[in-house]
Amino acid sequence: MIQSKVKMPTLINIDAYIKGDKKEVPDAIGPDDPTKIFNYLCKKLKAEKVDETIIAFSSEKDDWYIKLFDQPDYCVFTTMVSPKDDNYVSDDWTQDITKYIEEMQKVIAVMPRNRIANLRIIGTTGFDEHAEAKTFIDEYAAFFDKRINEIGLMYNFCMLCKDDQIENPPFYMKDYIIAPITPDRFEAERIILEVIDDLNFLAAYEGKLDRMYRVYVDIEAKFKRMENKSIAEMNKVAGILKKDLEVKQLEQYLLKINSEFAEISTLAAVLSHDNSTVTSNISNANVIYSKWNEKEFSGYPKVHIASMRDLEIIANAYKSITEKLEVVRGRLHDTLEIIKTYLDLKQQNLSLQLQKSVDASGRSQIDLLYAQEEEKRMAESSKRSLENLTYIFAGLGLCEVLANFVVVYLTEGSPVSVTAMFLSLTLIIPLVVIWVLFAKLQKRAQVKIESDLKEFSSKMKSKKKVASKKSN
């Protein structure tokens, strides 16, 4: 049985969205979508624009307000329904709130589903005593089958409580109760609006963090695969150092490791940016919580302490995986350096061997050139020697013939001429024989020289081929 008398029972629904390019960020809405949605709601609900950010319409007993808070990277829609009568006190607030929840569906149905945060808030203009507020909280927990986890007093007298969120409908992420404890209705309304504005910002900040935590879960799974892979690569490197692999195989393996290193470096850069975003959003949320100056209520944990604890879990998760990723990145970097050093040493060794081959080939070529020059010089020397001998023997033969003619002429008709002719013929015959023998010797010497030169040339060519093969 409902015992509490609730002043102005009000239902507030807060939807937060992230903005961006839908091609790059699938769960985002377009930069112009908030204005389009706002104008569509105005037309569909036949509402009036109070200003550029608020539309309002009324039913028989209730007033509705929809406010758009539009920022460059996110936006928040706040829908609020409450009784027209500012002095209305509900004898059974559960019936009023149940009716509001059903009517709120026509607004929720128009909103995009890819919200990053959704808050349902039940508010009142307050209670005169703490006991009445406590009765209201107990009735709320029983009616919605909730377990209240945190309650705090903010701004000195406004009670804020948050439930366990276990049995929330799919379109709600968090449920709150706002109930000022004061008889001053106007002060209560002012504080309620202040708290709603605070929750608008918190919906965006904490919604971004919830979204980033889901991203973190995917990154962690990817990281584990990378970590296992990096360990396997280190084991392979240990095996490679024991083998004499070809340079081409080493280069292929180096390219593979380098690709993995580039991938993990890109992920590390993304994580570094995300880690900064996480820290920034937590800092923004903490500014709002600090402003509340929250105090304890009936022994319950304070709302901001529990919320900041949850946010710190996200921060620690990102910090931890960033540090682990740097370890894996360092491990891959060391692997790359080991392979590069091993490859450099192998290339240096090959370069030295090549240089030795080139030097040996150069020396062989020099020897070959020297041999060719020597061959040419020997051939020319032999030719000149043979020519000189030929000229000498030809001169001797000619001198002898002339001498014979002289002797015959001087001793013509005398016995001496016969003798001279005999002597001349006697001398000519040996000379002819000597000439023939000399020609044969000359030819044989020429053949021997050519044979020796060919043999020497063949040996030098063989050396040149061997040097060429070593160079290759």
Image (tube, grey):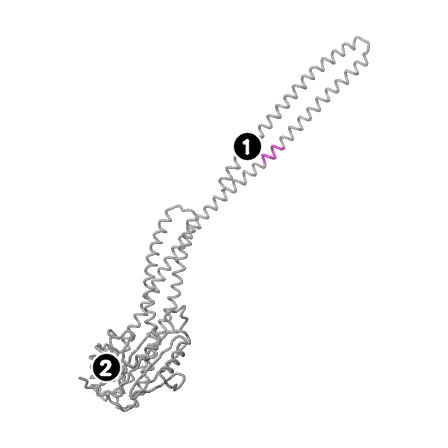
Front residue (pair 161, 99): 99
Say which residue label 2 marks.
Answer: 297
Magenta region includes residue 462: no
452 sits to left or right of 99: right
Marker disc for residue 458: 1
Vertical placement of 177 versus 444: above or below?
A: below
- The secondary structure that most of the magenta stretch takes on is helix
Q: Position of residue 264 (x, y in %)?
A: 38, 61
Which element carries disc 1, helix, strand or loop? helix
Q: What is the C-alpha distance between the residues marked 1 and 2? A: 109 Å
Vertical placement of 383 versus 318: above or below?
A: above
Which element carries disc 2, helix, strand or loop? loop
Residue 414: image quadrant is top right
Q: How many marks?
A: 2
At 35% from the left and 49% from the top, the residue drawn is: 239
For label 2, the crowd category at 10 Å Cα-Cα, with few meaning under 14, some 14 to 19 and many 20 or more, is some
365 sits to left or right of 420: left
Q: Earlier in the sequence, mark 1 or mark 2?
A: 2
Q: Amino acid at mark 1?
A: Ser
Magenta region includes residue 375: yes
At 33% from the left and 64% from the top, the residue drawn is: 218
Front residue (pair 49, 413): 49
Residue 390: image quadrant is top right
For label 1, the crowd category at 10 Å Cα-Cα, with few meaning under 14, some 14 to 19 and many 20 or more, is few
Residue range highlighted in magenta: 370-376
299 sits to left or right of 356: left
Image quadrant for the N terminus? bottom left
Q: Position of residue 3 (x, y in %)?
A: 19, 86
Q: Amino acid at mark 2?
A: Phe
Q: Position of residue 347 (x, y in %)?
A: 45, 48
Q: Position of residue 332 (x, y in %)?
A: 38, 57
